[in-house]
């Protein structure tokens, strides 16, 4: 296949490039350094547009990281980076003689409300109204706004992706080794997650299954509460104790780290109903299996 990964220079883009190493993979990036990387600014047309002709798959991973303080400047950039890249890709596809057959666009499992008991499926998940959820809603609205008769569209509502090179796993591992790997807040918030290998396999599965379209949850089938997750991580790292982090301490800590407590305290209780019903099988269904593989 000819696969184009827009914004593919980050953790997930690199993981996908490695996963599809036996295919023709091109990366759209602001800082091209390798022969298969093409310059683009994620908002205006340029020479990069030719790469979409006769592509089998377009995967758009573009968007400013949400691991920052939600001040006015960052809020505007988080939204703009997602909408601009989606809109400019749509313009190019509309003008392609041979457009990509499949377009996968990033979204996020944080589109659903804080939920500790109710599982959020694609059919029954409750989408709320705050900054993060509205970002996701606007993102998907822009993605699905224009029908593309020759290009199948899928929005990937992705949970936290656990991988050795991933920022989330690296930070959790670091604080645990420093003895700070206790529960965060009350520890009851659910953590929806997926091993990076299953993330890549799920993407390939969706590409192969032409019956899948619309929004789909990319998350392992067993969300786990924060307290249990941190205990399993301590066990795998052989760290005997972990100091808990009450909410007020997290507020202070995230201020110094220039991030937001929402990333730690929001309960994401997401279930991959459509993936499972379509026949996808996870290699890492439990956090215990995933963390064992990552640590070892």
Image: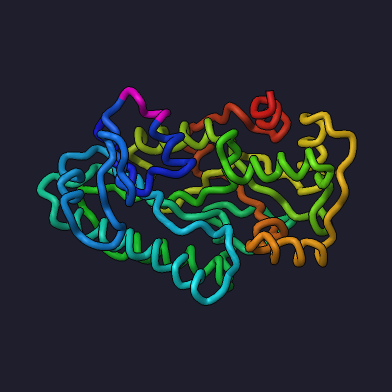
Q: Could you say where residue 216 lies in the image, as x and y percent from the top left?
A: 47, 49
Residue sitting nearer the eye, 44 or 202? 44
Task: Inspect this view and state whether residue 161 appears.
Answer: yes
Picture residue at 29% right of the left edge, 47% below the top = 152
Q: Magenta segment range?
A: 18-22
- Give the number of callouts: 0
Which quarter of the figure has residue 24? top left
Q: Quadrant of the C terminus?
A: top right
Q: At x 72% / y 51%, what residue is drawn?
A: 190
Q: Is residue 161 left or right of residue 1?
A: right
Above or below, comparing residue 8 to residue 284 in the picture: below
The residue closer to the viewer here, 14 or 59, is 14
Quadrant (top left, top right, bottom left, bottom right) of the N terminus = top left
Up-down: is 229 above or below 263? above
Image location (x, y in percent) of residue 115:
69, 59
Q: Examine the rendered structure and indicate whether residue 204 appears above or below residue 39.
A: above
Q: Is residue 79 left or right of residue 148?
A: right
236 left or right of 58? right
Where in the figure is residue 47, as x and y percent of width and height? 16, 51
Instruction: Give left or right: position of 9 versus 52.
Output: right
Q: Quadrant of residue 85?
A: bottom left
* Percent of width and height locating residue 123: 53, 55
Residue 92 on the magenta segment:
no
Magenta stretch: dominant SS?
loop
The answer to whether any part of residue 154 appears in the image is no
- Taking depth in this image into account, of 68 and 90 the one nearest to the observer is 68
Could you say which quadrant of the image residue 5 lies in?
A: top left
- What coloring was used for the rendering? rainbow
Q: Residue at x 45, y 49 (%)?
A: 156
Which residue, as the protein is rendered here, is positioned at the far left? 97
Say which residue appears at 64% left-offset and 41% top-offset: 169
């Amino acid at each position: 296949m000819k696969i184009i990964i827009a914004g593919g220079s980050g953790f997930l883009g690199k993981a996908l490039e490695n996963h599809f190493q036996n295919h023709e993979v091109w990366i759209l990036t602001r800082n091209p350094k390798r022969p298969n990387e093409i310059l683009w600014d994620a908002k205006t047309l340029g020479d990069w547009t030719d790469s979409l002709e006769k592509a089998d798959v377009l995967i758009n991973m573009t968007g400013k990281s949400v691991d920052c303080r939600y001040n006015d400047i960052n809020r505007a950039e988080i939204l703009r980076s997602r909408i601009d890249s989606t809109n400019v890709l749509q313009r190019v596809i509309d003008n392609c003689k041979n457009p990509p057959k499949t377009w996968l666009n990033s979204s996020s499992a944080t589109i659903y409300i804080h939920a500790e008991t109710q599982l959020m499926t694609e059919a029954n998940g409750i989408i709320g109204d705050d900054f993060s959820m509205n970002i996701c809603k606007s993102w998907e609205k822009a993605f699905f706004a224009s029908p593309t008769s020759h290009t199948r569209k899928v929005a990937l509502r992705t949970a936290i992706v656990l991988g050795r090179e991933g920022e989330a796993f690296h930070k959790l591992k670091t604080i645990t080794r420093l003895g700070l790997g206790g529960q965060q807040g009350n520890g009851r918030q659910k953590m929806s997650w997926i091993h990076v290998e299953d993330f890549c396999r799920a993407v390939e599965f969706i590409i192969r299954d032409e019956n899948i379209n619309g929004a789909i949850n990319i998350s392992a089938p067993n969300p786990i509460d924060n307290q249990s997750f941190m205990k399993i991580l301590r066990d795998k790292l052989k760290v005997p104790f972990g100091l808990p982090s009450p909410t007020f301490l997290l507020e202070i800590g995230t201020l110094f780290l220039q991030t937001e407590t929402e990333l730690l305290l929001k309960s994401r209780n997401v279930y991959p109903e459509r993936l499972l019903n379509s026949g996808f099988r996870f290699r890492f269904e439990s956090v215990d299996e995933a963390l064992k593989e990552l640590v070892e």
